[in-house]
């Protein structure tokens, strides 16, 4: 059941302004049109770059909350919500993120992922209800290009009242919801090529911010070794091959030795890698990893400190 239609509103946001250089886009040649789109896309990365200092602080605080037992909850509608669902879903196969560590809440639920559902983004009560499970140790991330979406407002208000850390990802530096965010991540991407179509530059900026945010959190949590995905879950043939390749690249051993180490570690990459790097058994590697919160780098430092050997990479 969808909520009753909300009164008409006039949204004031950069994404709702008409772009002066694209007024004749419908009369351009196809190449001209694509060139304009590409030119505008090139402005997104610098806009994201401008908010990286704030993002860095948000990442550090998020890591601290996760280490204290918290989780991350995304709240968004439309394009913003779909991007959040994608980001949360991809963390498990890439980094073996525990189930429930990153949770995406999309206005309108699963149905709204593939088809627009009327009025769900205007349902502030639904956002508040879905955020009721967000606790003080958690992080709530609201995503709204305009900076005003009622569903996100309800979620952030409830999460903040519960004591959670709150982030707002938006394309509007003057976002209405900014007072509800501990960290405002406003990538000022300006007017869209197609007025109001936030699946374009604003959506791209949100995708980049989410990629950077969740990836940095995973790296800080020790779910990589160097730039290798040592927590990757081998759910198919391609990924099983990748696990073997990662182990060989990280340790420098031949394929036979890598397979032997994986077998001894019951197919788990991290203990297999640490056993090779530290020249210890898989069982000893598991103990070290447990003591160092799953970080291969920290486990190596701990091992080297007890043996007196220099740390290696």
Image (cartoon, helix red, strand yellow):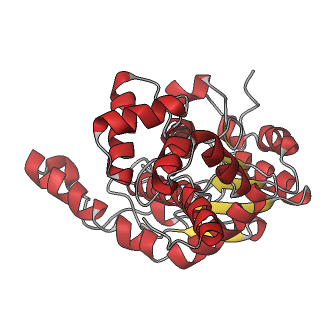
Residue 295 seen in the figure: yes
Residue at 36% across / 38% down in the picture? 257
Q: Quadrant of the N terminus?
A: top right
The location of residue 138, given as percent across then percent down, is 79, 54
Residue 76: name its quadrant: top right
The location of residue 275, given as percent across then percent down, is 52, 47
Residue at 80% across / 38% down in the picture? 130
Q: Quadrant of the C terminus?
A: bottom left
Residue 6: name its quadrant: top right
Residue at 17% across / 51% down in the picture? 34
Disc tally is 0
- Along the horizontal axis of the image, is 20 left or right of 205? left
- Along the horizontal axis of the image, is 226 left or right of 182? left
Identify the residue at the far front of this view: 307
Which residue is at the front of the view, 87 or 120? 87
Residue 168: name its quadrant: bottom right
Residue at 53% across / 45% down in the picture? 270
Position above or below: 199 against 37: above
The location of residue 205, given as percent across then percent down, is 44, 59
Residue 145 seen in the figure: no
Position above or below: 228 against 189: above
The location of residue 153, given as percent across then percent down, is 75, 53
Which residue is at the front of the view, 165 or 235? 235
Which residue is at the front of the view, 173 or 235? 235
């Amino acid at each position: 059941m969808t909520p009753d239609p909300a009164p008409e509103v006039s949204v004031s946001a950069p994404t709702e302004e008409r772009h002066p250089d694209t007024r004749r886009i419908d009369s351009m040649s196809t190449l001209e049109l694509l060139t304009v789109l590409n030119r505008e896309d090139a402005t997104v990365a610098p806009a994201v770059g401008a908010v990286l200092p704030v993002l860095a602080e948000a990442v550090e605080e998020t890591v601290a909350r996760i280490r204290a037992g918290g989780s991350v909850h995304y709240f968004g509608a439309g394009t913003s919500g779909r991007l959040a669902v994608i980001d949360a879903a991809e963390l498990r196969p890439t980094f073996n993120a525990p189930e429930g560590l990153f949770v995406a809440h999309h206005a309108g639920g699963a149905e709204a992922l593939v088809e627009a559902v009327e009025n769900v983004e205007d349902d502030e009560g639904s956002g508040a209800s879905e955020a009721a499970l967000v606790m003080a140790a958690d992080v709530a991330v609201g995503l709204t290009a305009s900076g005003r979406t009622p569903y996100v407002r309800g979620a952030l208000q409830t999460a903040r009242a519960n004591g959670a850390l709150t982030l707002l990802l938006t394309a509007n530096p003057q976002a209405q919801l900014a007072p509800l965010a501990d960290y405002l991540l406003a990538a000022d991407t300006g007017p869209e090529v197609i007025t109001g179509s936030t699946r374009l530059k604003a959506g791209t900026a949100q995708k980049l911010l989410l990629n950077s945010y969740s990836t940095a959190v995973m790296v800080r949590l020790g779910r990589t070794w160097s730039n290798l995905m040592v927590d990757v879950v081998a759910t198919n043939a391609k990924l099983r091959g990748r696990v073997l390749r990662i182990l060989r690249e990280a340790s420098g051993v031949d394929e036979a030795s890598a397979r032997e180490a994986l077998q001894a570690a019951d197919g788990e990459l991290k203990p297999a890698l640490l056993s090779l790097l530290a020249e210890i058994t898989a069982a000893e590697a598991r103990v070290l990893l447990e003591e160092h919160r799953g970080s291969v780098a920290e486990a190596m430092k701990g091992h080297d400190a007890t043996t007196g050997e220099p740390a290696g990479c």
